[in-house]
Image (tube, rainbow, N blue to C red):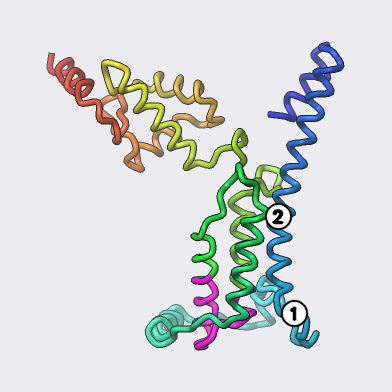
């Protein structure tokens, strides 16, 4: 949006003030994105620095991405052996957090929470719980009873990669989905369904034609390229109920509208 405003301003013949404002908006937008990427990188670096002052350089942490690469003609485990191994580990291995591992996970969580923008995707205790579960799984994979510092760092690396994948925009830059920016699929769904319910409560019918839904999506400015696909997805997910060629929100409580609709169908 800011890029398009900048381009249009350069060729629209409007005054210098509008061109300057468009340029400032564009620069501010990319500065926000750069800050989001730095917040994630700084949080992981702070976590990785925990307890490294007295560590022997020869035993320094090797990134998980490097260790996951296949070496030579190494053969993977068969499905049957892998299933038995996982079953055994789940049944008999229950690792506990060491103080150093807990500090690494807590540092990453608190640093990310501190640095993430307040008007963007929230950093909640769910992320911390995910970090702990990943660290437990990493230790359980090697049938260990203690979760080590390297297990915790592996968990941080996995969470960081997942956040980069989930929050990156079309240019590959991390974006914490600030208010006014690109909405997530879940927030778009919530906004769309809430608008349908609000429209239903003030209208005579709770039912919408495909044209009505298209108009509502455009009115909300959701930025959805394939509105038909979006609506079909809501129908499959049970958010929308389809009756003939009309749609109704599954959470709508407009019983009067429903009764009128079915009476008109019977007539």
**Marks 1 and 2, how far apart in space?**
21 Å
Q: Which residue is mark 1?
A: 52
- Specify whether 254 is left or right of 192: left
- Specify whether 5 is left or right of 156: right
- Specify whether 135 is left or right of 267: right
Q: In the rendering, which numbered label is found on residue 22? A: none
Secondary element at image label 2:
helix
Magenta-colored segment: predominant secondary structure: helix
Secondary element at image label 1:
loop
The location of residue 82, given as percent across then percent down, is 46, 81
Disc 1 residue crowd, few under 14, some 14–19, many 20+, Cα 10 Å: few
Location of the N terminus (image quadrant) = top right
- State which quadrant residue 147 falls in: bottom right
Location of the C terminus (image quadrant) = top left
The structure residue drawn at horizontal position 62% and vertical position 80%, both measured from the top left corner, is 100
The structure residue drawn at horizontal position 38% and vertical position 37%, both measured from the top left corner, is 234
Q: Is residue 139 magenta?
A: yes
Q: Which residue is mark 2?
A: 39
State the extent of the magenta-drawn residues as a range. 132-153
């Amino acid at each position: 949006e800011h890029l398009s405003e900048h381009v249009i301003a350069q060729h629209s013949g409007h005054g210098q003030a509008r061109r300057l404002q468009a340029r400032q908006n564009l620069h501010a937008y990319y500065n926000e994105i750069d800050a989001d990427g730095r917040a994630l990188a700084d949080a992981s670096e702070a976590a990785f620095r925990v307890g490294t002052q007295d560590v022997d350089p020869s035993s320094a942490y090797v990134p998980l991405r490097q260790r996951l690469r296949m070496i030579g003609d190494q053969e993977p485990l068969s499905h049957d052996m892998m299933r038995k191994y996982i079953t055994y580990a789940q049944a008999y291995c229950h690792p506990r957090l060491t103080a150093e591992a807990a500090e690494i996970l807590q540092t990453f969580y608190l640093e990310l929470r501190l640095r993430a923008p307040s008007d963007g995707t929230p950093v909640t205790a769910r992320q911390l719980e995910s970090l702990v579960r990943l660290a437990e799984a990493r230790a359980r994979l090697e049938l260990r009873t203690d979760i080590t510092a390297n297990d915790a760092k592996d968990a941080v690396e996995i969470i960081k990669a997942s956040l980069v994948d989930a929050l990156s925009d079309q240019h590959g830059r991390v974006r914490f989905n600030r208010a006014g920016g690109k909405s997530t699929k879940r927030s778009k769904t919530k906004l769309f369904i809430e608008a349908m319910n609000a429209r239903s409560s003030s209208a005579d019918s709770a039912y919408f034609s495909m044209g009505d839904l298209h108009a509502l999506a455009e009115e909300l400015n959701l930025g959805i390229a394939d509105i038909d696909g979006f609506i079909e997805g809501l129908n499959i997910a049970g958010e929308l109920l389809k009756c003939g060629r009309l749609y109704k929100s599954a959470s709508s409580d407009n019983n009067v509208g429903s009764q009128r609709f079915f009476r008109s169908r019977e007539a």
